[in-house]
Amino acid sequence: MPTDSRPPATLRPPNLEPVNAPHENLPTDHTLVLKVIPMPSDANANGDIFGGWVMAQVDLAGSVLPARYAQGRMATVAVNQFIFKQPVRVGDILSLVAKMERIGRTSMTVSVGVYAERMRNQGRYIKVTEAQLTYVAIDEEGRPRPVPARELPMSS
Protein backbone atom coordinates (compact mmCIF):
# COMPACT_ATOMS: atom_id res chain seq x y z
CA MET A 1 0.00 0.00 0.00
CA PRO A 2 1.66 3.28 -1.11
CA THR A 3 1.96 6.07 1.40
CA ASP A 4 1.78 9.76 0.68
CA SER A 5 4.95 11.48 1.86
CA ARG A 6 3.57 15.02 1.41
CA PRO A 7 3.01 17.04 4.58
CA PRO A 8 -0.64 17.56 5.51
CA ALA A 9 -2.28 20.61 3.95
CA THR A 10 -2.69 23.54 6.31
CA LEU A 11 -4.27 26.93 6.03
CA ARG A 12 -1.83 29.72 5.62
CA PRO A 13 -1.82 32.25 8.44
CA PRO A 14 -4.05 35.31 8.11
CA ASN A 15 -2.64 38.08 5.95
CA LEU A 16 -1.68 40.89 8.32
CA GLU A 17 -0.07 43.21 5.78
CA PRO A 18 -1.82 46.57 5.33
CA VAL A 19 -4.08 46.87 2.32
CA ASN A 20 -3.19 49.62 -0.10
CA ALA A 21 -6.61 51.28 0.10
CA PRO A 22 -7.70 54.72 1.21
CA HIS A 23 -8.99 55.07 4.73
CA GLU A 24 -12.51 56.44 5.05
CA ASN A 25 -14.89 57.63 7.71
CA LEU A 26 -18.15 55.82 8.30
CA PRO A 27 -20.85 57.69 6.35
CA THR A 28 -22.95 59.99 8.53
CA ASP A 29 -26.11 59.47 6.46
CA HIS A 30 -26.15 55.72 7.21
CA THR A 31 -27.11 53.85 10.39
CA LEU A 32 -24.73 51.40 12.04
CA VAL A 33 -26.76 48.18 12.11
CA LEU A 34 -24.21 45.41 12.77
CA LYS A 35 -20.65 44.82 13.96
CA VAL A 36 -19.05 41.41 13.48
CA ILE A 37 -15.59 39.82 13.54
CA PRO A 38 -14.91 37.03 11.02
CA MET A 39 -13.16 33.98 12.44
CA PRO A 40 -10.78 31.40 10.90
CA SER A 41 -13.67 29.04 10.15
CA ASP A 42 -15.06 31.77 7.83
CA ALA A 43 -11.85 31.87 5.73
CA ASN A 44 -10.83 30.15 2.53
CA ALA A 45 -7.48 28.44 1.99
CA ASN A 46 -5.86 31.79 1.15
CA GLY A 47 -6.78 33.23 4.53
CA ASP A 48 -9.40 35.60 3.12
CA ILE A 49 -13.02 35.51 4.24
CA PHE A 50 -15.47 33.71 1.95
CA GLY A 51 -17.54 36.09 -0.16
CA GLY A 52 -20.65 34.09 0.72
CA TRP A 53 -20.04 34.73 4.41
CA VAL A 54 -19.82 38.47 3.72
CA MET A 55 -23.01 38.27 1.65
CA ALA A 56 -24.86 36.61 4.53
CA GLN A 57 -23.77 39.37 6.91
CA VAL A 58 -24.88 42.02 4.40
CA ASP A 59 -28.30 40.35 4.09
CA LEU A 60 -28.69 40.35 7.88
CA ALA A 61 -27.58 43.98 8.17
CA GLY A 62 -29.68 45.01 5.19
CA SER A 63 -32.84 43.66 6.79
CA VAL A 64 -32.59 45.79 9.96
CA LEU A 65 -33.98 49.08 8.62
CA PRO A 66 -36.65 47.60 6.31
CA ALA A 67 -37.93 45.54 9.25
CA ARG A 68 -38.84 48.82 10.97
CA TYR A 69 -41.05 49.72 8.02
CA ALA A 70 -42.43 46.24 7.31
CA GLN A 71 -43.53 45.70 10.93
CA GLY A 72 -43.86 41.97 10.31
CA ARG A 73 -42.62 39.25 7.98
CA MET A 74 -40.47 40.20 5.04
CA ALA A 75 -38.14 38.46 2.62
CA THR A 76 -35.11 39.33 0.53
CA VAL A 77 -36.29 39.42 -3.08
CA ALA A 78 -33.28 40.86 -4.91
CA VAL A 79 -29.63 41.64 -4.58
CA ASN A 80 -29.54 44.57 -6.97
CA GLN A 81 -25.81 45.22 -6.66
CA PHE A 82 -22.93 43.66 -4.77
CA ILE A 83 -19.36 44.92 -5.09
CA PHE A 84 -16.38 43.44 -3.28
CA LYS A 85 -13.86 46.29 -3.12
CA GLN A 86 -11.18 44.81 -0.80
CA PRO A 87 -10.62 41.43 0.84
CA VAL A 88 -11.98 40.80 4.33
CA ARG A 89 -9.56 39.12 6.69
CA VAL A 90 -9.73 37.01 9.82
CA GLY A 91 -9.89 39.33 12.83
CA ASP A 92 -11.15 42.41 10.97
CA ILE A 93 -13.78 44.34 12.87
CA LEU A 94 -16.54 44.86 10.33
CA SER A 95 -19.01 47.72 10.66
CA LEU A 96 -22.08 47.30 8.48
CA VAL A 97 -24.05 50.48 7.85
CA ALA A 98 -27.38 50.85 6.06
CA LYS A 99 -29.52 53.52 4.46
CA MET A 100 -33.07 53.25 3.15
CA GLU A 101 -33.14 54.20 -0.52
CA ARG A 102 -36.75 53.54 -1.52
CA ILE A 103 -40.04 52.46 0.00
CA GLY A 104 -42.62 51.18 -2.46
CA ARG A 105 -46.08 49.76 -1.90
CA THR A 106 -44.79 46.31 -0.86
CA SER A 107 -41.01 46.54 -1.28
CA MET A 108 -38.12 48.41 0.30
CA THR A 109 -34.63 49.01 -1.11
CA VAL A 110 -31.64 49.54 1.17
CA SER A 111 -27.96 50.29 0.58
CA VAL A 112 -25.38 48.59 2.79
CA GLY A 113 -21.74 49.53 3.22
CA VAL A 114 -19.19 47.27 4.90
CA TYR A 115 -16.15 48.90 6.49
CA ALA A 116 -13.22 47.00 7.99
CA GLU A 117 -10.96 48.00 10.82
CA ARG A 118 -7.86 45.89 10.30
CA MET A 119 -6.48 43.89 13.22
CA ARG A 120 -3.38 46.06 13.50
CA ASN A 121 -4.98 49.33 12.44
CA GLN A 122 -8.11 49.75 14.52
CA GLY A 123 -9.93 53.05 14.36
CA ARG A 124 -9.17 53.45 10.63
CA TYR A 125 -11.81 52.19 8.24
CA ILE A 126 -11.48 50.69 4.77
CA LYS A 127 -14.59 50.19 2.65
CA VAL A 128 -14.53 46.51 1.69
CA THR A 129 -18.00 45.89 0.26
CA GLU A 130 -21.05 47.79 -0.90
CA ALA A 131 -24.43 46.40 -1.83
CA GLN A 132 -28.03 47.27 -2.57
CA LEU A 133 -30.82 44.86 -1.67
CA THR A 134 -34.60 44.81 -1.99
CA TYR A 135 -36.91 43.29 0.60
CA VAL A 136 -40.66 42.73 0.32
CA ALA A 137 -43.19 42.72 3.13
CA ILE A 138 -45.07 39.39 3.12
CA ASP A 139 -48.12 37.99 4.85
CA GLU A 140 -48.36 34.66 6.69
CA GLU A 141 -48.85 32.82 3.38
CA GLY A 142 -45.74 34.42 1.90
CA ARG A 143 -47.63 36.78 -0.43
CA PRO A 144 -46.62 40.44 -0.80
CA ARG A 145 -48.51 42.81 1.48
CA PRO A 146 -48.44 46.61 1.78
CA VAL A 147 -45.65 48.21 3.78
CA PRO A 148 -47.53 49.79 6.71
CA ALA A 149 -44.99 52.43 7.82
CA ARG A 150 -44.00 55.25 5.48
CA GLU A 151 -42.04 57.20 8.07
CA LEU A 152 -39.51 55.83 10.53
CA PRO A 153 -40.25 56.32 14.21
CA MET A 154 -37.96 58.89 15.81
CA SER A 155 -34.77 57.21 17.03
CA SER A 156 -33.31 58.00 20.41
Image: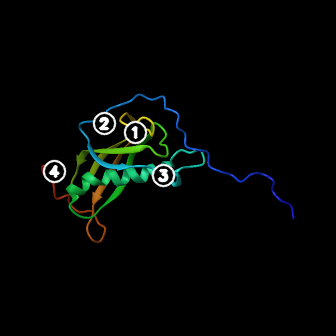
Q: Which label is found at residue 108?
A: none
Q: Amino acid at mark 3?
A: Met
Q: Earlier in the sequence, mark 1 or mark 2?
A: 2
Is residue 60 visible in this depiction of the protein?
A: yes
Q: Residue furthest front?
A: 120
Task: Please provide percent x and percent y for residue 136.
Answer: 29, 57
Q: How many discs mark residues in the rendered view?
A: 4
Q: Amino acid at mark 1?
A: Glu
Q: Which label is found at residue 26?
A: 2
Task: Please provide percent x and percent y for residue 10.
Answer: 65, 51
Instruction: Give the alpha-carbon distance from disc 4 to disc 1, as whole Å.
Output: 30 Å
- Residue 95 left/right relative to 146: right
Q: Badge 2: how crowded within 10 Å, few (<14), some, or many (20+)?
A: some
- Residue 5 left/right relative to 18: right
- Note whether 18 is above or below 30 in the view shown: above
Q: Earlier in the sequence, mark 4 or mark 1?
A: 1
Q: Which residue is mark 4?
A: 152
What residue appears at the point 15 percent right and 52 percent down from the top-left corner? 150
Nearer the observer, 71 or 140: 71
Quadrant occupied by the N terminus = bottom right
